[in-house]
Image (tube, rainbow, N blue to C red):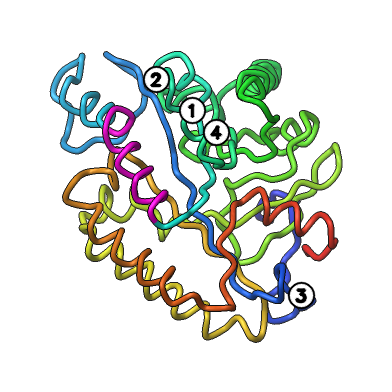
Amino acid sequence: MSQHHDRYAYRPIIDRPDYDWPDGRRLAIYLGVNYEVFDFGGGLGAELAPSQTQPDVMNYAWRDYGNRVGAWRLFDLFDRLQLRTTALLNSAVLDRCPGLAEACRDRGDEIAAHGGSNAQAQGKLSRHAERMLIADVTARLTALGTAPTGWLGPWISESEHTPDLLAAEGYRYVLDWAHDDQPTQLATSDGPLLSIPYSQEINDIPSIIQRHQEADTFAAMIRAAVEQLLSECDRRPLVLGIALHPYIMGQAHRVPPLAKVLTELRAADDPRIWWTTAGDIAAHVAATGVAV
């Protein structure tokens, strides 16, 4: 018999309760923006080109560009479009990039936890070490003003205990499980934990780095996904998370296509769309008790 995670049961999307997002809206869209730091001379990290030696100056510097330049370019875009985002923060950003996390907070973004750094994947840690990591990240991000309620694991890395540890630490939702277009309940030893959809398709790392697509294609994917989900949302409420990394989509040549599609969607002012954050989605679901 094959092994099962026992976190959620199978239930097709056509066989679930119907409900609305606030003000009768039907498609919730949020931007999950990843603010990440990496180790110089080792550790994990996406590669623009294969590493030849360590220290890998080329790939390290390419990733560092996102925090030094790309993030601020995206802030300009989000400000112009009056878009509040979900800021997915490595806690090490507070040390390595002073002012960046604070800028996210000050512009009103939701502060969500994204582990300690993206140089490490937490899934290999012992239960005790992972619990300590989660507690440390939570405490450090709480110092920005509000305790984070959501978690995205670096590299979507989980141990078999991660949902239990997150629930025990007081988290309301996790973004690691890209298995649905609706929020679902994950079973944990400390009560339910919401899984909020976070796309591994409408996500610039797999699109641009893994598939070698470019920004025009990525923008077209966003446009097509919204079109399709709007065609379904009269039958069921849906969520689209758009995952961005400043060292990828914050590059000068990639911002214009992203800006164009987001501007078009905002200008259309479709009454079915709720522009929101992952945390507000989770709070709405918790308040109404509608997740399966």
N-terminal label among 4 and 2: 2
Does residue 139 lie above or below 274 as drawn? above
- Identified by mark 2, the residue type is Cys
Instruction: Report how far apart the C-alphas of labels 3 and 1 lie in the structure.
Output: 34 Å
N-terminal label among 3 and 1: 3
Instruction: Report how far apart the C-alphas of labels 4 and 1 lie in the structure.
Output: 6 Å
Residue appearing at x 29%, y 48% in the figure: 249
- Identified by mark 1, the residue type is Ala
N-terminal label among 3 and 4: 3
User: What is the secondary structure assignment of the residue under circle 4?
Assistant: helix
Locate residue 153, reporting x and y percent. Answer: 55, 36
Q: Which residue matches tag 2?
A: 97
Instruction: Report how far apart the C-alphas of labels 2 and 1 lie in the structure.
Output: 8 Å
Foreground: disc 2 or disc 3: 2
Q: Is residue 218 left or right of residue 136?
A: left
Tag 2–tag 1 contact (CB < 8 Å)? yes
Q: Is residue 162 left or right of residue 48?
A: right
- Identified by mark 4, the residue type is Arg
Q: Is residue 224 magenta?
A: no
Q: Which residue matches tag 1?
A: 101
Q: Which residue matches tag 4?
A: 105
Tag 3–tag 1 contact (CB < 8 Å)? no
Locate residue 59, reporting x and y percent. Answer: 21, 28
Tag 4–tag 1 contact (CB < 8 Å)? yes
Foreground: disc 3 or disc 4: 4
Q: Which residues are magenta?
A: 66-80
Residue appearing at x 54%, y 63% in the figure: 29
Instruction: Report how far apart the C-alphas of labels 4 and 2 lie in the structure.
Output: 14 Å
Residue appearing at x 81%, y 65% in the figure: 290
